[in-house]
Amino acid sequence: MTDWDAGRYLTFADERTRAAADLLARVPLAAPARVVDLGCGPGNSTALLAARYPGAAITGLDSSPAMLAEARRTLPDLAFVEADLAAWEPEAPPDLIYANAVLQWLPDHAALLPRLAGFLAPGGCLAVQMPDNLDEPSHRLMREVAAEAPFRDALSGAAGARTTLGSVQDYDTWLSRAGCSVDLWRTTYIHPLPGHRGIVEWVRATGLRPFLAPLAPDEQAAYLARYEAGLREAYPAQEDGRVLLPFPRLFLVARRR
């Protein structure tokens, strides 16, 4: 798959950062010494961490060179490291591992989240936010169009790029067994977008990437046209032409006892 497009991702920076801020607001740490922004992207979440914890040693980790280049450009005083997030291990126990909109790309949460919690210093927190929208029309249509004859063979594995989230009971069980107290909640944001093309542009930076990457440019155009037609049926426009996009997200803050 091609690298992430930081500029496209930041087109909706305010909307994406809103969930990051809501997650950080529930972290109960006053002055953590070591903070890791796991999957920092272009640094919008890292900037929130730096503003709240100016005395902390903050490191942003990501697997995308393009995202890291943007993060280093906007936050030159912070440390950013390219890393395989599935295999990452800290050199010293962090007080906060903050993972905003990244763990949905990694498999086996039953093992992954307890593993991350096990890296924490005593009293430290694992703070996670993940899109919980695979059953929304925006993402169901990705799979339905991919299953159509012109795209079926090339996109047979695209739907597996994201992990299906566990239930809230699953996450509570996995992290409680790992010695954490767990705060869980789910929020559905309603994002007003400028027409159905706005939904396409939103998800093109994230969820659509596995569906577009295997296609040639003319095939991408055909896929997007069919996808946008489905969006027009699934999301009725408001009187002024805007379209309201419901976006469910799952949040958790696990504190190591």
Image (spheres, grey):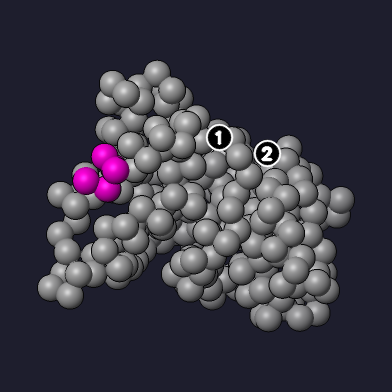
Instruction: State which region is magenta.
Output: 225-229
Let me know if residue 133 appears in the view: yes
Q: Is residue 252 left or right of residue 55?
A: left
Number of numbered discs: 2
Q: Relative to 218, does residue 200 appear above or below in the rendering?
A: below
Q: Is residue 224 left or right of residue 99?
A: left
| Location of mark 1 (residue) | 107
Q: Kindly indicate the quadrant of the structure image that contains residue 51.
A: bottom right
Query: What quarter of the picture does the C terminus occupy?
Result: bottom right
Label 2 secondary element: loop
Query: Distance from label 2 to label 1 (Cα)?
Result: 8 Å
Q: Relative to 186, does residue 159 appear above or below in the rendering?
A: above
Q: Position of residue 183 (x, y in %)?
A: 49, 61
Prevalent SS, magenta region: helix
> Amino acid type of disc 1?
Pro
The residue positioned 36% from the left and 53% from the top of the image is 200
Callouts 2 and 1 close, C-beta under 8 Å: yes
| Location of mark 2 (residue) | 86
> Amino acid type of disc 2?
Ala
